[in-house]
């Protein structure tokens, strides 16, 4: 409410309130150890949330952009800072290097703005968040080198400690978490377990002589796939962080600011202005180079600049270490705090404006996958709450959910309804699925609503972070590859050959633990219909009973205009073709039974 009345972002409002009620203001809230600890947790929470919400499909598709932008965001501010501090301000090389580490890092303090507008899965945000991992890591490594004046022994420790830390957090933690979430479904226990891993990651990172914020970010990356943004667990984590810990962190930053120091002389103002200009110029140059190198829009450039311009966690870590080591003076400390306030305010306004414009553009781009969708989600045994989880993860529109008694009931609904139908059976929690094994029949691309079924797979993969493997024939694969490369809707996927639906058992040989089977079926008398579809229940029971399954029937309509399609008309399946296929299917079943008997 306070921020709304002043027409400023909430982040700036918390900082101003912290200045007002802190020990340097009205002194209503003393700077106690409790506030410091809760603020530290908030800082860790912020980094954890930014890591857990990154879209790995986008990062994998833009891995070189992520690495390059992370290097740009660190290197340009570092070089400008070294030149200004060493030759303009006359600082020593040690002090200049520490200042360079401060300029090279940034804190995603404006990330909640991105989450509020729902664009955290866009490629631009994914590049920035992934690049943050690179730039923060480089800045903290530089800080570790300068801070301790590392000897050869220290270098040896760092060389083996950092890779070991990566292995523990990025390899061991996800496996333990996946096993825990599969066995326990109590929401309180799940929440406490995630908080335990977050705290443990920060502690391990600090034990390796690096700042805990790096560990929190790595923990978010490690648990990314297990925490879908629309899951109940992630909503609880976000609520607790955004309502308690992150505000306390922002209040703590505001409480550090002593306004009276700025009137004691011009030195602090000159240092603060110089630091602000260096930081902004370096981050803006990184966004400018990325815009022209990758042909981004001006809105995307402003969003990248706004997200990386803010400073808090890394800056506070550097200035605190430098001040305690008597490398930084009191003027540098106060100037750094003023820089934090100015940059957080400026980046909040820039991010708010750019995120709003980009959100409007994304809504227009994504509408083709969602417009006028109607879904029925059915199940024989899965609880309705799990059906709701699937619908939320796949962002299905106008959904009706129901449990049915048998596959005969499913077939009756499919015959009677024209909307898209999905039959879901859950064998393990959706957020623990690591791969989607998608079987696509011949001529599936000829279906009018194939684009909607593809959109379901794409959105589901993006939400739960699962890899996608398509099994299709060569002609259908060409269309799938084109669809996977669509701008704004790209889907990194693998492709395996499956000439016909009779080869469905190829998947049974390749499916493994934590995989989910997705079958794109169709109704009779449609282009891609195959009589073997009638055997789907039996096939699932015999070969895929231990795995979660999703059978999708595209919408069937008569007439109308196709507004978003790759399709070309082909003749409907003839009665003769269907009869021949049924005879062929019967003969194959008899041969299989004879082989089993012998």
Image (tube, rainbow, N blue to C red):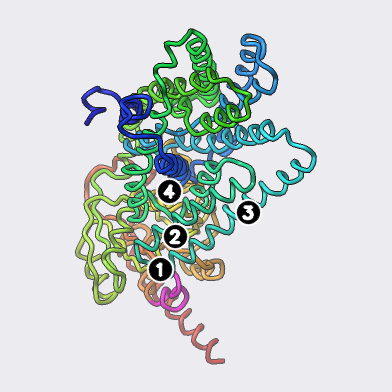
Q: Label 3: few (<14), some or many (≥20) within 10 Å? A: few
In the picture, residue 496 is in which quadrant? bottom right
CB within 8 Å, label 4 to label 2: no
Mark 2 sits on what residue?
193
Q: Is residue 258 above or below residue 588?
A: above
Residue drawn at x 33%, y 32% as measured from the top left: 359
Q: Position of residue 225 (x, y in %)?
A: 46, 53
Give the SS element for disc 1.
Answer: loop
The CA distance from mark 2 to mark 3 is 19 Å
CB within 8 Å, label 3 to label 4: no
Q: Label 1: few (<14), some or many (≥20) within 10 Å? A: few
Sequence-wise, the earlier of marks 3 and 4 is 3
Mark 3 sits on what residue?
167
Q: Label 2: few (<14), some or many (≥20) within 10 Å? A: some
Whether residue 165 is visible, yes or no, is: yes
Where is the C terminus found, in terms of image quarters? Answer: bottom right
Which mark lies nearer to you, 4 or 1? 1
The CA distance from mark 3 to mark 4 is 24 Å
Q: Which mark is residue 462?
A: 4
Sequence-wise, the earlier of marks 4 and 2 is 2
Sequence-wise, the earlier of marks 4 and 1 is 1
Where is the N terminus found, in terms of image quarters? Answer: top left
Residue drawn at x 47%, y 43% as measured from the top left: 44
Question: In front: 483, or 356?
Answer: 356
CB within 8 Å, label 2 to label 1: yes
Mark 1 sits on what residue?
184
Whether residue 483 is visible, yes or no, is: no
Residue drawn at x 52%, y 61% as measured from the top left: 498
Residue drawn at x 44%, y 70% as measured from the top left: 547
Give the SS element for disc 4.
Answer: helix
Which residues fall within the magenta stretch?
538-548
């Amino acid at each position: 409410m306070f921020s709304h009345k002043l027409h400023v972002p909430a982040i700036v409002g918390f900082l101003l309130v912290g200045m007002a009620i802190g020990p340097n203001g009205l002194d209503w809230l003393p700077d106690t150890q409790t506030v410091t600890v809760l603020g530290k947790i908030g800082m860790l929470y912020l980094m954890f949330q930014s890591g857990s919400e990154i879209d790995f499909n986008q990062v994998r598709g833009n891995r070189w952009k992520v690495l390059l932008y992370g290097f740009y965001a660190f290197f340009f501010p570092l070089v400008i800072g070294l030149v200004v501090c060493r030759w303009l301000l006359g600082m020593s090389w040690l002090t200049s290097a520490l200042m360079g580490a401060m300029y090279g890092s940034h804190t995603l303090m404006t990330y909640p703005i991105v989450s509020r507008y729902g664009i955290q899965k866009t490629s631009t945000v994914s590049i920035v968040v992934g690049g943050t991992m690179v730039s923060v890591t480089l800045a903290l490594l530089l800080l570790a080198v300068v801070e301790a004046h590392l000897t050869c022994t220290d270098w040896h420790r760092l060389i083996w400690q950092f890779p070991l830390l990566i292995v523990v957090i990025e390899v061991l933690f996800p496996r333990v978490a996946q096993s825990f979430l599969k066995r326990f479904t109590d929401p309180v226990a799940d929440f406490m377990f995630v908080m335990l891993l977050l705290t443990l990651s920060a502690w391990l990172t600090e034990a390796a002589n690096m700042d805990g914020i790096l560990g929190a970010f790595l923990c978010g990356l490690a648990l990314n796939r297990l925490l879908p943004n629309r899951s109940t667990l992630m909503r609880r984590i976000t609520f607790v962080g955004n309502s308690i810990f992150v505000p306390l962190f922002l209040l703590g930053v505001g409480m550090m600011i002593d306004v009276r120091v700025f009137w004691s002389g011009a030195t602090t103002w000159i240092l603060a202005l110089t630091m602000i200009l260096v930081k902004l110029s370096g981050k803006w140059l990184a966004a400018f180079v990325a815009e022209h190198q990758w042909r981004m829009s001006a809105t995307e450039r402003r969003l990248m600049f706004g997200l990386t311009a803010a400073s808090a966690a890394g800056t506070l870590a550097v200035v605190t270490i430098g001040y305690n080591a008597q490398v930084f003076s009191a003027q540098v400390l106060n100037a750094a705090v003023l820089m934090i306030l100015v940059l957080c305010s400026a980046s909040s306004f820039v991010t708010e404006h750019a995120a709003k414009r980009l959100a409007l553009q994304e809504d227009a781009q994504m509408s083709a996958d969602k417009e006028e969708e109607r879904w029925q989600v059915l199940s024989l045994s899965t609880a309705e709450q799990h059906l709701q989880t699937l619908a939320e993860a796949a962002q299905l529109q106008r959904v009706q959910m129901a449990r049915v008694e048998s596959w005969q009931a499913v077939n009756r609904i499919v015959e009677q309804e024209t909307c898209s139908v999905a039959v879901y059976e859950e064998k393990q929690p959706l957020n623990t699925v690591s791969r989607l094994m998608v079987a696509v029949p011949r001529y599936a691309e000829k279906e009018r609503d194939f684009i909607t079924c593809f959109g379901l797979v794409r959105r589901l993969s993006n939400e739960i972070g699962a890899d996608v493997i398509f099994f299709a024939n060569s002609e259908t694969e060409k269309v799938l590859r084109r669809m996977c490369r669509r701008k704004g809707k790209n889907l990194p996927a693998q492709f395996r050959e499956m000439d016909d639906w009779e080869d469905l058992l190829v998947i049974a040989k390749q499916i493994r633990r934590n995989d989910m089977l997705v079958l794109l079926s169709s109704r009779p008398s449609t282009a891609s219909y195959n009589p073997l579809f009638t055997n789907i229940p039996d096939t699932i029971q015999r070969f895929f009973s231990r795995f979660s399954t999703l059978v999708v029937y595209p919408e069937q309509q008569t007439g109308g205009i196709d507004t978003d399609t790759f399709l070309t008309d082909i003749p409907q399946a003839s009665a003769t073709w269907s009869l021949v296929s049924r005879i062929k299917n019967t003969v194959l079943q008899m041969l299989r039974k004879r082989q089993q008997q012998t």
